[in-house]
Amino acid sequence: MAAREAIEPPFDELRFTFARSGGPGGQNVQKVESKAVLRWDAARSRALPRDVRARFLARFARRLTAEGELVLASQRHRERERNVADCIAKLRAMLAQVAAPPKPRRPTQPTRASRERRLAEKRAASRRKAERRRRGDDA
């Protein structure tokens, strides 16, 4: 099975908006819109293969809006360009997590020791209940 190369974000589908960042920075932070907010309509994206899109929507369902839009924000840096790059890096990391299909689960058998423990616990419970029944008859 060939490994799938990293999926690039669909740059033509990404929308950026900018806002003023919070935190320290003096006058600059109050007049420069350096916070980057990335919006991507993941549910309707045609850039991803269908299976990858399904895994993305399932894995990150809690991070999507009701319309299926992913919203990522970055205000770590003082420069707008670095915050845009940070948003794209976050999206790349998310896509990398769902790029490869999950490995199929191989069912395992219970070990001999675990089967013996389970049977021993059942025998002990049976003895406890049998003793309760015997005591109840005498009264």
Image (cartoon, helix red, strand yellow):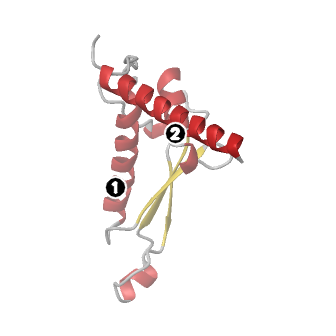
Q: Is 99 left or right of 62, judged from the image as shown? A: left
> Is residue 139 positioned above or below 42 on the image?
below
Q: CA distance from mark 1 to mark 2?
A: 17 Å
Q: Residue 38's spot in the image, x, y percent?
A: 48, 53
Instruction: Name the residue rendered at 36%, 24% in the picture.
Output: 116
Q: Where is residue 24 drawn, in percent x and y?
A: 35, 84
Residue 4 in view here: no
Along the horizontal axis of the image, is 100 left or right of 41?
Answer: left
Q: Nearer the viewer, residue 16 or 121?
A: 121
Quadrant of the rendered structure where residue 79 is? bottom left
**Residue 104 against residue 62 in the figure, above or below:** above
* Amino acid type at image mark 1: Asp
Nearest the viewer among 85 and 99 is: 99
Q: Which mark is residue 86?
A: 1
**Earlier-in-chain disc, 1 versus 2:** 2
Camera-side mark, 1 or 2: 1
Farthest residue toward the top?
Answer: 1
Q: Amino acid at mark 2?
A: Glu
Describe the element under mark 2 as helix, strand or loop. helix
Q: In the figure, 42 relative to 35: above or below?
A: above
Can you say whether 107 is above or below 30 in the image? above
Residue at 45% x, 72% y: name it: 33
Q: How many marks?
A: 2
Residue 64 is situated, as x and y percent measured from the top left of the image, at: 58, 47
Q: Which mark is residue 13?
A: 2
